[in-house]
Amino acid sequence: MAGEDELVHEERLSPNHDDRALPISMVVLHYTEMKPVSTAIERLTDPEAKVSAHYLITEEGGVVRLVPEARRAWHAGASFWRGIPDVNSASIGIELDHPGHAPENGGYRGFADAQIDALLPLLARIVKQYDIPRANVVGHSCVAPMRKLDPGELFPWDRLAQYNLCLPRPSCLMAGDPFPNDGAFYLALERFGYDITDGHKAVEAFERRWRPEHITGVVDGELAAILWQLLLDRDQGRTR
């Protein structure tokens, strides 16, 4: 039984969780990179695998609860966001049934409409219940840029932004480069929330989220203008 939550269609509870050390303040979106979906569920509920998430959403739109939200699921691994190194303690993890970038699964492709249609109300309920800032609805690559690519450059962040469930891509950008050099950009990127231990990977992760049509890992004027606007909006109280 899925309990009283009408947005959840099935429970396949995982033993892989422990106590939270922080209040819930973010959502991390993943893809499973495993096919078929039964393989992903088996791994996420296998005590030997030591991985889990709170929810998995199938490509057909089925929502499976794996870990109660009050518990710390093991989905983000070594990660960092906005000064928080224990992302698992502060987040709810949602896995999307998807082949990912793995060529053996058929290669990277877009996300099913039914899957995103199921994600939207679930995410809306979570964001409202825990008062999660839109800047804290992130991808796995945002919080682990050196290790992860998911949910990837084809994830429809714009659909989430239409419902105020994540930050939209800035559209009004200043002309010119607001940062005098790459080092200044990296520091601003860290200020926004990213781990900049590997600058190239951090820039790629930023591009994957904010300019997915052109991923180079190299700082340029457009990226600088996007980051500048994101920080300006936050500093002036338009976002948080």
Image (cartoon, helix red, strand yellow):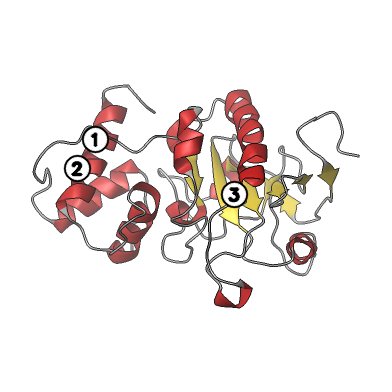
Circle 1 residue = 229
Query: Relative to residue 17, is residue 160 depicted above or below?
Result: above
Q: Residues within 10 Å of mark 3 (few under 14, many from 20)?
A: many
Q: Amino acid at mark 3?
A: Asn
Q: Of all residues shown, which one is farthest toward the bottom?
A: 104
Q: Amino acid at mark 1?
A: Gln
Q: Secondary structure at mark 1?
A: helix
Q: Residue at x 8, y 50 (%)?
A: 180
Judged left or right of residue 186, residue 81 is right
- The answer to whether mark 2 and mark 1 are in CB contact below 8 A is yes
Query: Relative to residue 106, is residue 170 depicted above or below?
Result: above
Q: Residues within 10 Å of mark 2 (few under 14, many from 20)?
A: many
Q: Secondary structure at mark 2?
A: helix
Q: Earlier in the sequence, mark 1 or mark 3?
A: 3
Q: Position of residue 232 (x, y in %)?
A: 24, 31
Circle 2 residue = 225
Query: Relative to residue 126, is residue 189 depicted above or below?
Result: below
